Amino acid sequence: MRMLTHERLSKVVAHALRHEPWLYELELDDEGWVPVDELLEALAAKGSDWAGLGASDIEAMLASSSKQRYELAAGRIRALYGHSVPGRLAKQKAVPPEILYHGTSPPAWVTIRSAGLAPMGRQYVHLSVDEVMAGQVGRRKAARAVVVRVRAGEAARNGVPFYRGNEHVWLADGVPARYLEAVDGASRPPPCAS
């Protein structure tokens, strides 16, 4: 039996609540909620590593995480963002900060700067509240990430809907290119290979 860490538990909970709940025989409601008891039963059915889990383990996982990925309330749990499940989870519109950021790769930036930000394989575009976090996200896609400044306040005033994911992440259906600019002159296309 492998050691059960909060990180390992968080990864399997993310898989169950964000990506493939049907593999765990879970039914998410319209806002992504599932009873904690059902989640625990589903995990226990996956093998002995998960058999002894209780609600206190889920609470400890949430308390130990540096990222606020889940919400726990009234005996239910949901992932706050990052869903790739079919169908669209309901989110409440909110007024975003004036500036948000998005990290991406140089080739993707070439498309984004003319077509805008789109959710791609997810339900929403993910935006960071700070440039550092956006850079970290972008470096998952390319060693030389492009950090995009999003004039979210202006976009929201012009009718672009935004949704609060958590204290670090905001979501949008999409953001038109006119509200985007690369940080530090990265708006130039990447050099062509000779």
Image: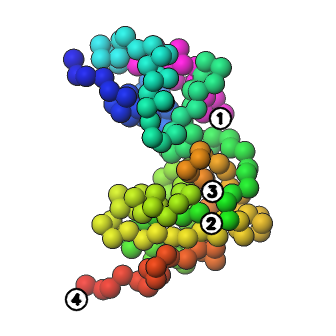
**Residue 62 at what x, y percent from top left?**
48, 30
Q: Which residue is mark 2?
A: 99
Between the residue at mark 4 and the residue at mark 1, the CA separation in whole angstroms equals 50 Å
In this rendering, the label closer to the viewer, 1 or 2: 2
List x then y, in percent, for residue 84.
50, 44
Quarter occupied by residue 177: bottom right
> Alpha carbon of mark 1 to alpha carbon of mark 2: how far?
26 Å
* Disc 4 element: loop
Looking at the image, tell me whether mark 4 or mark 3 is earlier in sequence order.
3
Which residue occupies 67% across, 60% down? 97
Secondary element at image label 1: loop
Residues shaded magenta = 26-44
Q: Quadrant of the C terminus?
A: bottom left
> Where 183 falls versus 188 (above or below)?
above
Towards the viewer: 151 or 78? 151
Check disc 3 and report the residue beneath it.
172
SS for callout 2: loop
User: What residue lies at 32% left-to-right and 85% top-to-bottom?
Assistant: 191
